[in-house]
Image (cartoon, coloured by chain):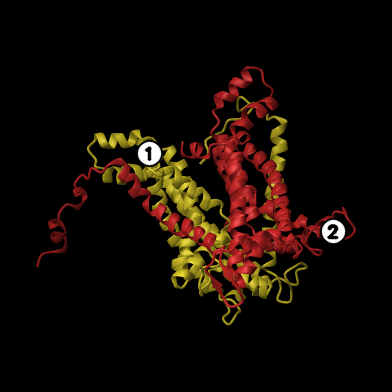
Amino acid sequence: MMVGGRTYSAGPGEGRPWTFYALATLFGLFLLFLYGPMLVMYILSFQGPEGGVTFPMVGFSTVWFAEIVKPGQMANIPASFARSIALAAIVSLLTVVFSVAAGLAFRRRFAGSGLLFYLAVASLVMPSLLVGFGIGLGFKAMGWKTGLFTSALGAQLTWTLPFGLFAMFAVVNRFNRAYEEAADDLGANPWQRFRYVTLPILLPGIIGVGMGAFTLSYDEYARTTLVIGERNTLPIEIYALISSASSPMLFAIGTVTTAVSFLIIGLALWRILRLQQRRRGLEAVR
Amino acid sequence: MTSFSDTVRALPRLGRWSLPALRLQPGIVSWLQVGPLAFVLIVLFALPTMLFAVVSFWDYDRTGIYPALILDNYRDLLTTPATIRVYVSSLTFAAIVWAITLFLGFNIAHFLVFHVRSAAMRTLLFLLCAIPFWTSGIIRTIAWIPFLGRNGAFNQMLMAAGVTAHPLDFLLFSSFAVIVTYVNLFTLLMVGPIANSLAKIDPALIEAARDAGASRWRIMIEVIIPLSKTGITLGSILVFTQVMGDFFVAKAMSGGQSASIVSALATEIQAMQYPPAAANAVVLVIFVAIMVGLMMRVVDVRKELVK
């Protein structure tokens, strides 16, 4: 990720300047600030059955977690959760494939590369709801019905692809083309070169892109909401709940979704670490 | 009957089979590689944008919308005092949030890149900052309500510590709450790009400055900050566009006192009043485009990113 480790003190034995302590305190306070509401949410998800969405805690129970899967609710959480995961998986896969290809393409200057770059920037900074609005209008104009894996997928891609592209820029910049030249010298054709040299070296970065795209898609609300069709994803279902029935169940949902995100990102990170360890192991053998 | 392994062995050796060398021109290869991405961005972003630009000139009434070329939507939009009010309000929020996230983001990025010694610790701390983002922004926003409310955790902590006798009222459903939530949600957008820029600074430059006798403060002002311009610009663009494009936080955390541009738009869309919504959208897009364009003049984003 980050190259660095430059510090202001010359050696390991030297003490740290006062700015270290000031900044460390600031950082600590910032973490508290970031996690404060999250902790409140985690705690309140164990709210007692009589309690409301604010303190005080009226007892301690897991009843709100059970509420999530109870049928006949105003919102169908498990189903929308499954849809969110499915959509995120597809978005992640497409983002990885398209971004890797495009990242490799941008290594040279080709006709239209500048325009495409700024198009990606524009897609990134465009207010999300407007993207959904445009796509929704387009579908209406063509007489198509909006749907989970058509318009919603497309809308989310306009968000994840620019991120994926810029992440691939960073990854590809660090890549040393000498490896590819060596592959050429050894007689590999372009496909073999890509599959046996380029791809494995870029793999940690690519997994990072996939992971990021999954999270972006899973939490996506604004771009998706106008083009989701009839079957909601989880964030949209949650939003409907907020407006209609506020209860600690919302916090229970938040806790569960955080846990799921943790799990998935943890898995991806573990995979990356394993890859890097194996690589270091191979290099040590040589 | 031949065994399965015999059959497999009889198949052509797929491992060494590969396509005959297709010598395509490099330009064509690039186009093929970038094709899918370009397709998505053009069909799902550029075209829809042009579509609502066109619709913004259409006529409408209670029963439907009609193709036309009228400026009424724009005239109505730009002459309503509410429009000016909401733009000023959003811009004010954007400016304040930008200043705070810049200060926080720069200091945190600086701490992570320059003061933390081990790479493992740095990755861990950075991950700690990023973990909250794995929870949906909407949930994180509403989690502030029990935190800041009159009976909320924060007030109870203050009263327990003896700082105040009565719960503070301005914490929630106020501009304060909106700003706090924005900062909570968007600081990481600053930390990321700035940390990236700071990490790219050649340590030799800092050493040279130190050898030339510069104090740490001067190094900061004259070497580090100028070299992190790209990160600051990128972070600023991200934060600014997120605040201007927000429709949930402003309404929820201000208790309905402040609207945001996009929430007004969303209401119009729900009422199926597409032409005025489209006009609203076009004005917002132009406004954001101008601001982002100005910010990108500070630094050549393309050169820095694709380098």
Which residue corresponds to the image point at 85% horizontal and 57% vertical from the top-left? B160
Label 2 marks which chain's residue? B
* Observer able to see residue B237: yes
Which residue corresponds to the image point at 65% horizontal and 67% vertical from the top-left? A251
Q: Position of residue B268 (x, y in %)?
A: 63, 68
Above or below residue B245? Residue B298 is above
Q: Position of residue A233 (x, y in %)?
A: 53, 69
Q: Position of residue B257 (x, y in %)?
A: 77, 63
Give the left or right position of residue A56, taking residue B273 as reference: right
Question: Quadrant of residue A277 in the image?
Answer: top left
Whether marks 2 and 1 lie on the same chain:
no
* Observer able to see residue A218: no
Of the residues shown, which amino acid type is indicated by label 2? Leu
Q: Nearer the viewer, residue B123 or A228?
A: A228
Residue denoted by label 1: A108
Q: Nearer the viewer, residue B112 or B30?
A: B30
Above or below residue B80? Residue A184 is above
Give the left or right position of residue A136, taking residue B29 as reference: right
Q: Which chain shows up in yellow? A: A
Q: Nearer the viewer, residue B147 or B281?
A: B281
* Label placed on residue B168: 2
Of the residues shown, which amino acid type is indicated by label 1? Arg
Give the left or right position of residue A94, taking residue B192 as reference: left
Which residue corresponds to the image point at 78% horizontal and 63% vertical from the top-left? B149
Instruction: State which mark lies toward you, 2 or 1.
Output: 1
CA neighbours of label 1 inside 10 A, class few (<14), some (14 to 19), many (20+): few
Label 2 to label 1: alpha-carbon separation = 58 Å
Label 1 marks which chain's residue? A
Above or below residue B90? Residue B207 is above
Q: Position of residue A172 (x, y in %)?
A: 42, 41
Q: Which chain shows up in red? A: B
Residue projecting furthest to the top = B212
